[in-house]
Image (tube, rainbow, N blue to C red):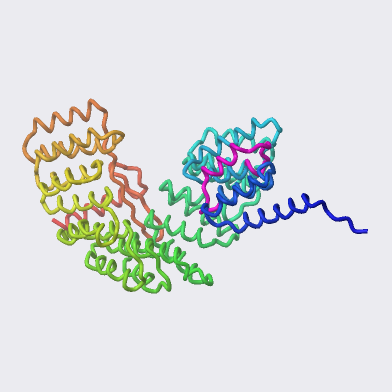
Amino acid sequence: MTHLLPHSTNNSIQAWKRCMSLAQRCTTMRQFKPIHAIFLTHGLHHNNYALSKLLSFCALSHTGSLSYASLIFTQMIQTPNSFIYNTLIRAYSRSSQPQLSLHYFHLMLKDCSNLVPDHHTFHFVLLGCANAKWVVLGKQTHNWVVKNGLVLFDGHVQTALIRLYVECKVLDDARKVFDEIPCLDVIQWNVLMNGYVKCNMGYEALKVFRDVLMTGIEPDEFCVTTMLSACAQTGALWQGKWIHEYVKKRKGMESDVFVATALVDMYAKCGCIGMAEEVFEGMPKRNVFSWAAMIGGLAVHGYAREAIHCLERMEVDDGIRPDGVVLLGVLVACTHAGLQEEGQLLLDDMEDRYGIRPKHEHYSCVVDLLCRAGRLDEALQLIRRMPMKPLASVWGALLSGCRIHNNVDLAELAVEELVMLENDGAEEDGAYVQLSNIYLGARRGEDARRIRRIIGDKGLKKTPGCSMIEVDGKVSEFVSGDVSHLHRAQICAMLELLSLELV
């Protein structure tokens, strides 16, 4: 005998199915709000499973709204379950407000229903600490996962711990966590290498890469891109060429736009602009970063006309509009080549022609261009017209121009402005040293001695210059005043011979 469901129960099931179907098909907040209203009218806001569907869209979809997801959470009638907490912790951990992921974690711990954080929770909490740069809370969470045993067997938690210490620039702790992982995957290698590169420790990144190859792990595109950045950073051309040969042997990797762009950048920064152009022209697909790398390379090597030609080509050849980085590269090229008219015209036309409002770095570049040309008064006028507060790079460019062209009055003004800038101790050190030298050049010895006394009284020290060179595949670093290099005697002897030849 067939038993029919009561009419009200049948309606409830149909309403449930309809609401679930609407929630799955939702793609925008404009669609979402009426669906939320339907959930409320059918009483589904009492059901945690139904609300978790709505909250997931708001919190995790790129067309959702995290603030609306938080509003749904605050209006919940039932006690939230661990899935709902994890969803909000996950969403906020990767947002512009990562500190709120810790807020929901603390609410979860205080919840009277005795919810227990799981491996998902700790993974997202560690990412929130990493993105918020909260190393103390991150270490507390680290202790927690050690006690729970998660650090031994959960790869996501292990990777999040490495990322935490990398983002907080505590690389010794990152390496310690890394070394304690029994079975490493390529992502964990990548995170550690990327951390070294971000902290300007390219040598260490290259050492880790050698370990990757020795373990038999096959580097992926991200790993190769990171290593090429390390080569560019350290000037390690030989290692960069080896990686290029490796890329050629890996099927499909050479056509990867990010790998090819990293190759262009590496060759340009290692002094091989011809190789950079060869890789660039052979790319089957280019993006705005590819053009930025090529234009930046041409700029550094003094090929200003070629950089300007690339700017014109990128829209014609690839249909790509330049961004602020590309235009900055062209301005740098104009500065290095002394193309004053072209540089000023580009700055003036940026917003009308390309829809890009000039930023501080664009103004700084043109100020530098004018200063190098000796047009110091025009440079000062441009500084006064800037729509934002001039920072150290602008006043530093003016000060350098004053040193070249012996303008004491503007040099004093530039130093005065630099000293007034907050949190720029290094710039202040260099500014006083430059002003002292300018006074000496103008035969104002008493003023130079006064500045030297200020430097001594404040305990200021100018950051020493540093340069690198690769010889036979090995990179050597030289710091001004350093006498610790192994081959110092031979280097000095060779420099003495060269100086005799020059004389």
Is 301 within the magenta?
A: no
Residue at image location 31% in from the left, 66% down from the top? 273
- In percent of width and height, residue 205 lies at 47, 52
Please name whichever residue, 280 or 37, is drawn nearer the observer in this view of the structure: 37
Count how many numbered circles sit on residues in the image: 0
Residue at image location 47% in from the left, 49% down from the top? 204
In screen coordinates, is 213 left or right of 444? right
Q: Quadrant of the N terminus?
A: bottom right
Q: Residue furthest front?
A: 7
- In percent of width and height, residue 23 lies at 62, 54
Image quadrant assignment for residue 327: bottom left
Q: Residue furthest right?
A: 1
In screen coordinates, is 423 left or right of 24? left
In screen coordinates, is 279 left or right of 152? left
Residue at image location 54% in from the left, 62% down from the top? 220
Is 74 within the magenta?
A: yes
- In percent of width and height, residue 447 lies at 10, 31
In the image, residue 267 above or below residue 175: below
Please name whichever residue, 378 or 21, is drawn nearer the observer in this view of the structure: 21
- In percent of width and height, residue 430 lies at 23, 39
Q: Residue furthest top?
A: 457
Please name whichever residue, 437 or 296, is drawn nearer the observer in this view of the structure: 296
Residue at image location 57% in from the left, 62% down from the top? 218
Q: Which residues are magenta?
A: 61-85
In screen coordinates, is 136 left or right of 361? right
Image quadrant assignment for residue 257: bottom left
Q: Quadrant of the C terminus?
A: bottom left
In the image, residue 248 above or below residue 453: below
